[in-house]
Image (tube, rainbow, N blue to C red):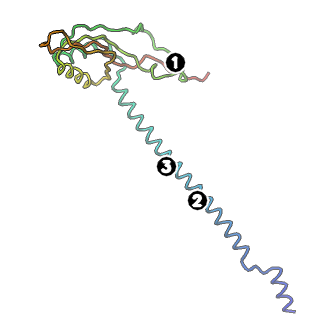
Amino acid sequence: MAIFVAAGYYFAYFDPGTSIEEATAVVQSNIQVEEAKKSEINKTMKKEEEMRGNVLQLKRNLEVIKSKIPVDLKDSQMQSIINSAASAAGVKITGLTVQTDGRDPNAPPVKISINDVKPENLIEEVKFKVSIIGSFDDFLSFVENLGKEDNVIKIRNFDIHKNSDDVDDDKIAFNGDIIGFKQAKIEIISGVK
């Protein structure tokens, strides 16, 4: 009788560990899936941290640039910067005229939707047409003096040529645009209606 009960138990209820092995295999496969997810999450978090660092660096760079672009740069201030750089370098200014873009400096800020903001809307130019005569070394000193200014200044649309046909005359003539930048008078409005 005991043999029949033992045989019945063996075939009906006895588990040699296969169900535990199957459960262990399922748990191990779930662990592998979760480890893969953890690895992906760690990669994503690392990329996000790098992006945060990049955004902070961009923000710092923009703050530096913004500090070098004044809210208001008047024509007289720009003219003073050019005259100071020229006198320190020893070049002679033969022509200095302001180039206006037709904007009224006393006009109220222009309202722009945040969706329509473009980089060219954020900055205005204070442009002067300049003619200079001096030696090449003095001209380089003039450009260097402009480069040392706290404000962002750009030289463009220029030509440099010999001042005269005289072989002994070592002076050059410079004609071009010297541009200072200031923050545009704009008011950014929300694009949501």
Position of the N terminus by quadrant: bottom right
> Residue 61, how many percent across, how many down?
38, 33
Specify few, some or many for label 3: CA neighbours under 10 Å numbering under 14, 14-19, or 20 or more. few
Q: Quadrant of residue 182?
A: top left
> Residue 114, how many percent across, how many down?
53, 23
Q: Amino acid at mark 2?
A: Glu
Q: Is tag 1's residue or tag 2's residue first in the polypeptide sequence?
A: 2
User: What secondary structure is marked by label 3?
Assistant: helix
108 lies left or right of 173? right
In the rendered view, would you say 103 is above or below 37? Answer: above
Q: Quadrant of residue 164?
A: top left
User: What secondary structure is marked by label 2?
Assistant: helix
Q: Calculate the distance from the C-alpha at mark 3 to the C-alpha at mark 2.
A: 16 Å
Identify residue for label 1: 112
191 lies left or right of 134? right
> Residue 147, how many percent across, how many down?
26, 24
Q: Quadrant of residue 91?
A: top left
Residue 46: image tag? 3
Residue 35: image tag? 2
